[in-house]
Image: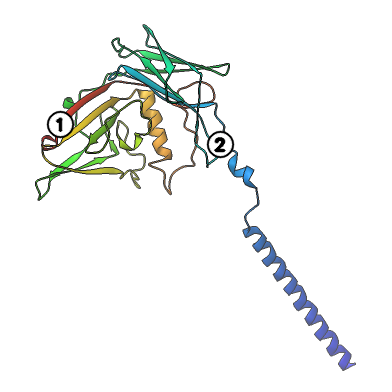
């Protein structure tokens, strides 16, 4: 009887160990399965949440006679580029006359000719007709404050070789008016509104303050070294209130995006319908300096 009783105790102990072992293996299996990435397939990653009819870039400026607008179809695949939109109708009304934009030799780029006077502080209306749909945008032409009457958003010093070293921050805060600047020197190309790939050369002065005073993520800048007699070319570009707010929102998602930033969202432009981008109307002041004059 003692032998049987002892055997039962051993059997119960083994069963208890077995149950613990099963529970342990089950927990491990659940943890491993939870750590695996779900297999959503390629279509999950290639299909954007929001799809757009087109993207609009450019608009109207007061410096050049030729005006440029680019229309593209946003890409839905990370391995492809936006496709140019052909055979669209584009008209800009400045409150007095219509500026008709014609398709240029560059696919997706439309050019208009304007030889009149700027209509300052008035609305310019863009109308695009494409694929049976109409799209409308409005922006106001704000007159720019002359460069000589404002502070330049750069700093310079003379080095030991008597050359001029300079720094151009991409973002400067606390200005009376928001502006976009294009500063050209050396091999940096001149500002050209028909070129839509010059965004790396722009710098910005903001009316609003830094979006994150505790963790500023805006230490982007360009540096240059020029001989005292070399020229530097400065373009100061006005921004309407809506355009400056649009750019500020874009930078919240790009230049100032960090660990403490909010969840990225879509930045809405000023074009009606299902369209990305912003139709901008800008006044431009241009000055040329020798490096030693800065």
* Residue ID at (62%, 46%): 42
> Can you say which quadrant of the picture contains the C terminus?
top left
* Residue ID at (69%, 65%): 29
In screen coordinates, is 238 left or right of 86?
A: left
Residue closest to the far front: 105
Q: Earlier in the sequence, mark 1 or mark 2?
A: 2
In screen coordinates, is 291 left or right of 130?
A: left
Is 124 located above or below residue 259 in the figure? above
Label 1: element kind? strand
Is 199 located above or below residue 2 in the figure? above
In screen coordinates, is 74 left or right of 155?
A: right
Could you give the CA–CA distance between mark 1 and mark 2, rounded to whole angstroms?
A: 45 Å
**Mark drawn on residue 171:** none
Residue closest to the far right: 1
Dot 1: few (<14), some (14–19), or many (≥20) neighbours within 10 Å?
Answer: few
> Can you say which quadrant of the picture contains the N terminus?
bottom right
In screen coordinates, is 99 left or right of 226?
A: right
- Looking at the image, which is closer to me, 250 or 20? 250
Dot 2: few (<14), some (14–19), or many (≥20) neighbours within 10 Å?
Answer: some
Label 2: element kind? loop
Q: Picture coordinates of residue 145 (x, y %)?
A: 22, 22
What residue is pinned by disc 2? 76
- Looking at the image, which is closer to me, 225 or 153? 225
Colouring of the image: rainbow
Q: Picture coordinates of residue 223 (x, y %)?
A: 23, 44
Q: Picture coordinates of residue 292 (x, y %)?
A: 11, 37
**Mark drawn on residue 289:** 1
């Amino acid at each position: 009887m003692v032998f049987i009783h002892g055997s039962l105790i051993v059997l119960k102990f083994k069963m208890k160990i077995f149950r613990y072992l099963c529970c342990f293996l089950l927990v491990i299996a659940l943890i491993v399965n939870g750590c695996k990435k779900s297999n959503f397939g390629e279509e999950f990653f290639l299909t954007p949440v929001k799809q757009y009819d087109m993207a609009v870039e450019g608009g109207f400026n007061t410096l050049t006679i030729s005006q440029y607008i680019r229309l593209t179809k946003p890409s839905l695949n990370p391995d492809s580029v936006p496709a140019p939109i052909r055979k669209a109708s584009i008209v800009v009304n400045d409150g007095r006359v219509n500026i008709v934009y014609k398709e240029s030799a560059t696919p997706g780029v439309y050019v208009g000719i304007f030889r009149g006077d700027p209509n300052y502080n008035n609305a310019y209306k863009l109308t695009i007709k494409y694929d049976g749909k109409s799209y409308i945008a409005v922006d106001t032409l704000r007159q720019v404050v002359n460069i000589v009457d404002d502070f330049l958003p750069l700093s310079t010093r003379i080095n030991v070789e008597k050359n001029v070293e300079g720094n151009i921050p991409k973002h400067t805060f606390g200005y009376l008016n928001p502006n976009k600047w294009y500063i050209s020197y050396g091999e940096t190309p001149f500002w050209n509104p028909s070129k839509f790939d010059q965004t790396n050369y722009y710098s910005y002065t903001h009316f609003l303050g830094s979006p994150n005073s505790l963790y500023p993520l805006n230490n982007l800048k360009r540096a240059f070294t020029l001989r005292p007699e070399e020229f530097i070319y400065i373009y100061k570009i006005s921004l309407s209130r809506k355009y400056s707010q649009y750019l500020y929102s874009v930078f919240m998602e790009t230049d100032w995006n960090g660990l403490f930033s909010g969840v990225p969202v879509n930045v809405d432009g000023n074009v009606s319908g299902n369209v990305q981008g912003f139709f901008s109307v800008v006044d431009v002041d241009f000055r040329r300096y020798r490096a030693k004059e800065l």
